[in-house]
Image (cartoon, rainbow, N blue to C red):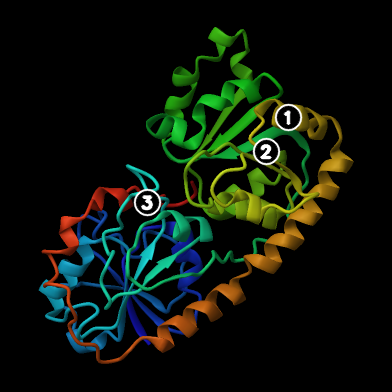
Amino acid sequence: MRILVWHVHGGWMEAFVRGRHEYLLPTSSDGGAWGLGRGGRELPAAAREVDLETLDPDSVDAVVLQRPEEITAVARTLGRRPGHDLPAVYLEHNTPKGDVPFTLHPLADQGSIPVVHVTHFNQLFWDTGSAATTVIEHGIPDPGHLYTGEQVEMGVVINEPVRRGRVTGTDLLPGFAGVGPLRVFGMGTEALPEALNLKGFGLSEKRLHIAGDVQAPKLHQELARCRLYLHPLRWTSLGLALLEAMHLGMPVLALDTTEAGRAVPHGAGLVSNDVDDLQKFARRLLDDPDDAYAMGIIAREAALQRYGLGRFLRAWDELLADLPQHTHGGSRPQPGTAFASHDTEASHDTERTHP
C-alpha cells in the first residue's frame, strides 16, 4: 500500500516505516510541523518525501492521520475525503488533556475513521463516544543489548522538561539528584540547570549532566552506560525512551502512572508512586552493578516480547488491510466542521522524538 503519513512523532515513525509498504511523507521548504518529511533521519528508502500540493491523488491508498487538521488538509490538496473516498485511520499518540476523564476526542462519535491508541490506558481514558477504537502498542527497532552501566548515574530522557514541568515529573528530579547524579537527554534540556537550581537544595551542580538532544544511535550508546533508567513522567503516553532503555538492557525506575505498570515487569526495576521507595531503590542500583545488570536482562526480555518490531508491524498490516477501500459518508458533516468543533488542542502536544 501507499500510505500518506505526516512525520509528527519521530520515534513512532522510526518503527512504522520499516514495514512492507510505501510511506509518503509530506515535505515543505520550511520543514516545519506540516512538512518535516524524513526529518534528517536515516529511514528506509520506502519512506519517501512528497509535495502534498502536487501529489497525484490516485497515488495514495490510505492515510494515517495524527492531527484533526490533517483531515481538511488532505481533502483540500487531494480532493479526497479521509474516511469517505480515502481509507483512513486516526492515530492518537497522547493521553487526554483537560477535564480528564471526560475529555472528548476530536474524532468522537463518528463512524468513518477508526481511532488507534498506542496504549490501553489511553483507550480507556479518552472519550471517543461511538467511534471505533483499537490499540496497537509501540514497536521498537531493537538497538541491541548495549547496557554496561559503567557510569554511576541515572539516565533520564525528557523533551522540553521545563515547559512541560509536572507533566514530565521535572519537579521530582532534585530529589533523585540528592541520591545520585542525573544524566538528562532530550530537547530543551539546556534550560534545566537554571530551572532546577540544585544549589537551592544544597546539592552540587555536578549532580546534573545535560546531554542534550542527540540522535538515536548515539543516545542508545550513551544511555546504556548509565547504571539505571529513571522515568519520572506523570501524565504522558508510554514513553518510547522507556521502552528503548529496556531494549538496551537497563533496569528501570518509573512512576506507576499511565501504562508503565504494564510495560515494566516484576524484577526489571521498580514501578511505584512512592517516591521515597523509588529513591531508595535508585541508591541500591547505583551501589550494586551486578543487581542492576540482572534486572536489565529481565527488562530487555520483556520489552522484546511485548514491544518487538515484528508484532507492531503485523498489527498495522492487519488494520490497514481491513480498511474499506471505498467508504461512504455517514452521519458526520464535511471535514473542517464537526471535527473542528471538539477540543483539538487536547491531542496536539505530540512528543516528537522521545518523551
Q: Residues within 10 Å of mark 2 (few under 14, many from 20)?
A: some
Left or right relative to 1: residue 276: right
Residue at 45% x, 18% y: name it. Answer: 194
First along the sequence among labels 2 and 3 = 2
Residue 236 image point, x, y percent: 47, 46
Secondary structure under tag 2 reads loop
Q: Nearer the viewer, mark 1 or mark 3?
A: 1
Residue 161 image point, x, y percent: 45, 33
Secondary structure under tag 3 reads loop
Residue 345: tell me if it is visible: yes
Secondary structure under tag 1 reads helix
- Residue 272's label in the rendered image is 2
Residue type beneath disc 3: Thr
Residue at 11% x, 64% y: name it. Answer: 337
Q: Residues within 10 Å of mark 3 (few under 14, many from 20)?
A: some
The answer to whether the residues at label 2 and label 1 have Cβ atoms under 8 Å apart is yes
The answer to whether the residues at label 2 and label 3 have Cβ atoms under 8 Å apart is no
The residue where tag 1 is placed is 277
Q: Nearer the viewer, residue 213 or 300?
A: 300
First along the sequence among labels 2 and 1 = 2
- Residue 93's label in the rendered image is none
Residue at 70% x, 68% y: name it. Answer: 305
The residue where tag 3 is placed is 350
Gap in angstroms between the C-alphas marked 2 and 1: 7 Å
Residue at 63% x, 29% y: name it. Answer: 182
Q: Nearer the viewer, residue 328 or 82?
A: 328
